[in-house]
Amino acid sequence: MRRRQVNIRSERACGYQYSILPFAFVSKAQSPLGLKRAMSRFLNVLRSWLVMVSIIAMGNTLQSFRDHTFLYEKLYTGKPDLVNGLQARTFGIWTLLSSMIRCLCAIDIHNKTLYLITLCTFFLALGHFLTELFVFGTAAPTISVLAPLVVASSSILGMLVGLQYLEAEPGSRQKKRN
């Protein structure tokens, strides 16, 4: 019994905690305090990512309103004759709306409803570019089309991981309604 207590003390000093099972050890990073720090750190990185993606989307919005040739020269190179000013402005409004939602989520990342809506914007963007690329043939596999696919895919992955952290939090920061 003494030997076991000495082993437990030395393991804790080395950065491990003793588990209920005799040979199962958990690092300090996985302890409740370490997990909370890791969650907070990850959500802060996710916030920064959402702000960056939001700012880039605002730039794309300005380009769509300024000159619609941007769309058929960079994105919809498969069938450029289908791109016109109306379609460019519609694309710009969609991009602006997505940008605003993502920025608001970065500000209030613990709002689960807003978080899920933001996640949906990335799914919609991924679906849009995939269908334009593979179904309708209006986009060619260029860097201008692959970049949004990579951003949407990695954002979905990051937000799904963040959703696990969000659900693991003990208490929600949202106000309770009476």
Image (spheres, grey):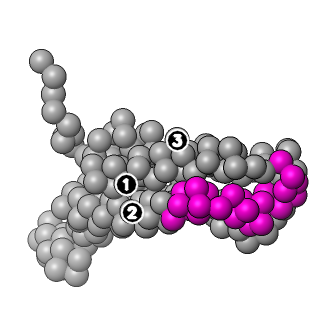
Residue on which the image places disc 1: 103
Secondary structure under tag 2 reads: helix
Residue on which the image places disc 3: 120
Toward the viewer: 76 or 163?
A: 76
Any magenta on residue 70?
yes
Work out which quarter of the rendered image holds the C terminus and state it. top left
Sequence-wise, the earlier of marks 3 and 1 is 1
Q: CA distance from mark 1 to mark 2?
A: 6 Å
Toward the viewer: 169 or 81?
A: 81
Q: Position of residue 139 (x, y in %)?
A: 81, 57
Please state which of the two labelled residues, at mark 3 or mark 2, is closer to the viewer.
Answer: 2
Is residue 173 visible in the rendered image? The answer is yes
User: Looking at the image, do the residues carrying marks 3 and 1 touch, with CB atoms under 8 Å apart?
Assistant: no
Residue depicted at 39% across the width and 62% down the height: 51
* Residue at the farthest top position: 178
Residue on which the image places disc 2: 51
Please state which of the two labelled residues, at mark 3 or mark 1, is closer to the viewer.
Answer: 1
Kind of residue indicated by mark 1: Cys
Determine whether, in the image, residue 120 is placed left or right of residue 134. left
Residue depicted at 65% across the width and 61% down the height: 67
Secondary structure under tag 3 reads: helix
